[in-house]
């Protein structure tokens, strides 16, 4: 019964450890996966010749121009969707660029569409909004989930404030945007994502409140010149860096998991080892005591044997000396008897002699 209870306790502790470790491990894996996707994208861009590069940019510009004053641009036909998915898809996996937010240490690939399969692992571009290559009268919209147990993504997007910057990298171009508007709206309110003539805008979208997701947080930025320091930051802040991998929350979760592991498995193992060692020592002591007792008993047996041998020898000697002693006794008795008789006779003679002397007188 006790072993069954211990097994159930260990099982619950193991499940708790898995639950605590899963977010951190999943986020590390997602960061690693994102870094590979980004590296693949950058490698493919570097292999492009200048003619193909220019043709892609021109094709996207024409697409963006077709969206201006198009009030039905968010409703795409199957043919339009197919054409949209082919634009800037140089790796064949749907990646069109990279979004970087230095303040919250985010660097993620941007995929076509905002389907759930995309938003579970990265960010997605809203179809019908401008493809993010910059330029006048463009407004790109990038969406990302927050609060997922498997990935960090846009979890910290609400930390951004007016004046913060974020960057979009498409092909070899780095576009920098400064936050100028932060609003919370209902999911179907798209007025703030409209294209503004003459402006180069980009909006980041995520769900709020965390876990409820009843509204959308819109963080809009306008295009500014990319500072040299920002370009340097892009190269130094990598998607698989330690800052992205281990947040404070994840470190706390891993710490709790380690403590639970120690309590549930390491401590009992140490206790069991100590108990076994104690039992071994007890067995050794008992064995030693048994050996000592056996040695003492053997010694006693030897002493008893020796004593018995001595007693037997004495008995034998006594038995041998009995007739001799009896004979001596008899001889002594006889000798004594003769001696007494002689003494008696002598005494009589002396008495008789004295008596005769008296008579003579």
Image (cartoon, rainbow, N blue to C red):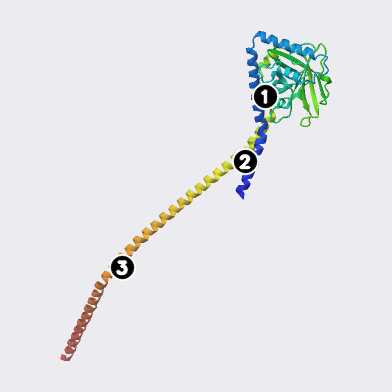
Mark 2 or mark 1, which has the lower sequence index? 1
Q: Quadrant of residue 87?
A: top right
Q: Quadrant of residue 316?
A: bottom left
Could you say whether the residue bearing mark 1 is in a helix, strand or loop? helix
Q: CA distance from mark 2 to mark 1?
A: 30 Å
Residue 42 placed where, x, y %?
A: 65, 16
> In this figure, which residue is indicated by the disc labeled 3?
315
Instruction: Please name the residue shown 73% across and 10% down the image.
Output: 58
Q: Are marks 3 and 2 in contact (CB under 8 Å)?
A: no
Instruction: Please name the residue shown 64% across and 44% down the image.
Output: 9
> In this figure, which residue is indicated by the disc labeled 2?
264
Considering depth in this image, is 227 or 328 the residue closer to the camera?
227
Instruction: Please name the residue shown 63% across and 47% down the image.
Output: 5
Task: Using the rendered image of the protein, determine whether residue 224 is visible from the camera's viewpoint.
Answer: no
Residue 102 placed where, x, y %?
A: 71, 19
Q: CA distance from mark 3 to mark 2?
A: 75 Å
Q: Are marks 1 and 3 in contact (CB under 8 Å)?
A: no
Considering depth in this image, is 339 or 55 the residue closer to the camera?
55
Could you say whether the residue bearing mark 3 is in a helix, strand or loop? helix
Query: Is the residue marked by circle 2 packed among few (<14), some (14-19), or many (20+) residues within 10 Å?
Result: some
Considering depth in this image, is 352 or 294 the residue closer to the camera?
294
Q: Is residue 28 left or right of residue 200?
A: left
Task: Using the rendered image of the protein, determine whether residue 346 is visible from the camera's viewpoint.
Answer: yes
User: In the displayed image of the protein, which residue is found farthest to the front?
Assistant: 79
> In this figure, which residue is indicated by the disc labeled 1?
244
**Figure check: 346 above or below 159:** below
Quarter the C terminus occupies? bottom left
Query: Is the residue marked by circle 1 packed among few (<14), some (14-19), or many (20+) residues within 10 Å?
Result: some
Q: Quadrant of residue 349?
A: bottom left
Q: Is residue 298 left or right of residue 206?
A: left
Mark 1 or mark 3, which has the lower sequence index? 1
């Amino acid at each position: 019964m006790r072993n069954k209870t211990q097994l159930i306790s260990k099982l619950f502790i193991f499940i708790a450890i898995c639950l605590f470790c899963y977010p951190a491990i999943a986020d590390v894996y997602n960061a690693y996966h994102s870094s590979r996707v980004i590296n693949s994208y950058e490698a493919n861009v570097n292999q492009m010749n200048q003619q193909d590069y220019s043709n892609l940019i021109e094709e996207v510009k024409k697409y963006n121009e077709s969206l201006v004053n198009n009030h039905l641009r968010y409703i795409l036909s199957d043919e339009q969707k197919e054409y949209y998915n082919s634009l800037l898809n140089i790796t064949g996996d749907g990646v069109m660029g990279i979004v970087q937010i230095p303040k919250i240490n985010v660097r993620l690939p941007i995929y076509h569409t905002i389907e759930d399969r995309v938003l579970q692992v990265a960010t997605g571009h809203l179809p019908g909004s401008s493809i993010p290559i910059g330029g006048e009268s463009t407004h790109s919209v990038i969406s990302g989930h927050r609060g997922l147990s498997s990935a960090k993504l846009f979890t910290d997007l609400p930390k951004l404030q007016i004046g913060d910057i974020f960057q979009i990298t498409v092909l070899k171009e780095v576009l920098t945007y400064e936050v100028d508007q932060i609003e919370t709206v209902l999911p179907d309110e798209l007025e703030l994502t409209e294209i503004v003539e003459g402006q180069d805008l980009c909006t980041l979208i995520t769900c709020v409140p965390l876990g409820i997701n009843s509204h959308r947080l819109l963080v809009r930025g306008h295009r500014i010149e990319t500072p040299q320091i920002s370009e340097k930051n892009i190269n130094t802040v990598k998607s698989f860096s330690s800052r992205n991998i281990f947040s404070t929350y994840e470190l706390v979760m891993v710490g709790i998991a380690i403590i639970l592991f120690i309590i549930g498995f390491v401590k009992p193992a140490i206790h069991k080892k100590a108990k076994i060692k104690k039992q071994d020592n007890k067995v050794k002591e008992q064995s030693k005591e048994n050996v000592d007792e056996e040695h003492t008993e053997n010694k006693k047996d030897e002493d008893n044997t020796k004593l018995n041998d001595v007693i037997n020898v004495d008995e034998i000697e006594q038995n041998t000396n009995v007739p001799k002693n009896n004979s001596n006794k008899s001889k002594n008795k006889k000798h004594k008897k003769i001696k007494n008789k002689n003494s008696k006779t002598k005494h009589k003679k002396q008495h008789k002699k004295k008596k005769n002397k008296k008579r003579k007188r």
